[in-house]
């Protein structure tokens, strides 16, 4: 089984102004609403088969995410001698698909830049940007080898490889465009963590999380937003969107939140999700790999770690304690940096009660 050969590829050819606390109080606004939509329409599948294997036929289609896609397509050539594979993504501009059309167009724009820059990512095989051929916004892309990093056990070298891969993405300097706009945080324009938002809303731990988040927002407001660098950002670089083979990163996928912004947007999100799965050392491994590839340190790491943590709901179930540890650690770093720069006193521990005197 393999993807369509290069010779056939020629034929197929803004920021949410609400604060984190305000976003937590409003209904989750998602790129994907997780309603069951089943398989894509026949016209979309037929287009994908023609794009992937002209004259061939569909051998199998497999949903990869809770009945909303993307879908893995397996197509046999006319003689049945070879099977070609591709990833089909479907969206719409009228709300009739789980993914919005702009997600698909943004991903396609990012994949084109990734290919021209030699970034490890799927290659775009085809795009129906406005539904002219299929009635949907649809894209077809190659399949990456390996398993997601979220399916793997802890590996320092794998995580450092991921950090290095992100650094190569962040070396790409582009101007914002219609489909790759300025990004201020990960997961734009959606919210993320949808299952946890619905499952744990109103739980006893939710209120405790809100208090910690309030402290974090207050500290964050005392620091200028880092603006020392701008580059291409993936926008949803959690470890489940990273493919790995052995101890190396094989590529990043799901580029629908990509855009132009500070590299910390990706690093804070990646470091958090690595820490939630493998412990705090995993986030440090990601940063070490990034800094080794970039050839310089990232001084604003703590700021972006706080941003990444604040994108989670106050209660995320069994991983809440790990998220709180990650956030408190970042807050301590921010507090110490403020003290060193401005000589401002601050409390030693975030959960320490203030003196009543």
Image (tube, helix red, strand yellow):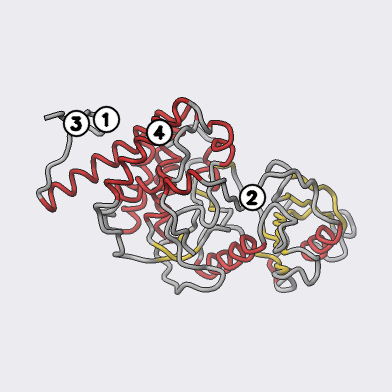
Tag 2 secondary structure: loop
**Residue on which the image places disc 2:** 32
- Disc 4 residue crowd, few under 14, some 14–19, many 20+, Cα 10 Å: many
From the image, state whether disc 4 or disc 3 is nearer to you.
Answer: 3
Who comes first in sequence, dot 4 or dot 3?
Answer: 4
Residue at mark 4: 209
Mark drawn on residue 351: 1
- Using the numbered discs, state the Cα–Cα distance from disc 4 to disc 2 in whole angstroms: 25 Å
Q: Quadrant of residue 216?
A: top left
Q: Compute the Cα span from label 4 to label 3.
A: 19 Å
What separation in Å lies between label 2 and label 1 (alpha carbons)?
36 Å
Report the front residue among 312 and 352. 352
Nearest to N terminus: mark 1 or mark 4: 4
Q: Nearer the viewer, residue 95 or 174?
A: 95
Q: Is residue 65 visible?
A: yes
Residue in the image at 85% along x and 58% along y: 77
Whether residue 145 is situated above or below residue 183 in the rendered picture: above
Q: Position of residue 171 (x, y in %)?
A: 39, 65
Q: In the image, 190: left or right of 33? A: left
- Choose mark 4 or mark 2, whichever is in front: 4
Q: Earlier in the sequence, mark 2 or mark 1?
A: 2
**92 lies above or below 287:** below
- Give the Cα distance between marks 3 and 2: 42 Å
* Drawn side of residue 77 relative to residue 316, left or right: right
Task: Report how far apart the C-alphas of labels 1 and 3 lie in the structure.
Answer: 9 Å
């Amino acid at each position: 089984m393999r993807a369509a050969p290069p010779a056939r590829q020629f034929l197929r050819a803004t920021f949410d102004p609400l604060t984190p606390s305000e976003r937590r109080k409003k209904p989750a606004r998602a790129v994907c609403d997780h309603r069951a939509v089943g398989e894509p329409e026949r016209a979309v599948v037929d287009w994908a088969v023609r794009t992937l294997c002209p004259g061939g036929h569909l051998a199998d289609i497999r949903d990869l995410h809770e009945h909303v896609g993307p879908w893995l397509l397996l197509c046999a050539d006319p003689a049945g001698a070879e099977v070609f594979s591709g990833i089909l993504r479907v969206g719409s501009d009228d709300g009739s698909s789980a993914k919005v059309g702009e997600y698909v167009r943004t991903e396609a724009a990012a994949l084109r830049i990734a290919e021209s820059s030699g970034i490890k990512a799927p290659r775009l095989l085809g795009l129906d940007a406005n539904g002219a051929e299929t009635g949907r916004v649809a894209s077809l892309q190659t399949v990456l080898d390996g398993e997601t990093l979220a399916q793997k056990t802890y590996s320092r070298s794998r995580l450092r490889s991921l950090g290095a891969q992100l650094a190569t993405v962040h070396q790409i300097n582009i101007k914002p465009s219609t489909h790759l706009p300025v990004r201020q945080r990960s997961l734009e324009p959606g919210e993320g963590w949808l299952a946890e938002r619905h499952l744990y809303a109103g739980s006893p731990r939710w209120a405790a999380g809100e208090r910690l988040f309030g402290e974090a927002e207050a500290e964050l407001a005392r620091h200028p937003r880092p603006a020392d660098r701008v580059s291409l950002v993936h926008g949803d670089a959690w470890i489940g969107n990273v493919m790995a083979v052995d101890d190396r990163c094989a590529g990043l996928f799901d580029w629908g939140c990509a855009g132009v912004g500070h590299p910390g947007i990706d690093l804070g999100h990646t470091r958090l999700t690595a820490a939630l799965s493998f412990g705090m050392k995993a986030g440090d491994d990601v940063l070490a790999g990034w800094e080794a590839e970039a050839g310089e340190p990232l001084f604003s790491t703590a700021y972006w770690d706080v941003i990444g943590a604040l994108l989670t709901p106050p209660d995320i179930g069994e991983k809440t304690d790990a998220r709180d540890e990650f956030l408190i650690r970042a807050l301590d770093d921010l507090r110490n940096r403020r003290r060193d720069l401005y000589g401002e006193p601050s409390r030693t521990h975030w959960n320490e009660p203030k003196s009543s005197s």
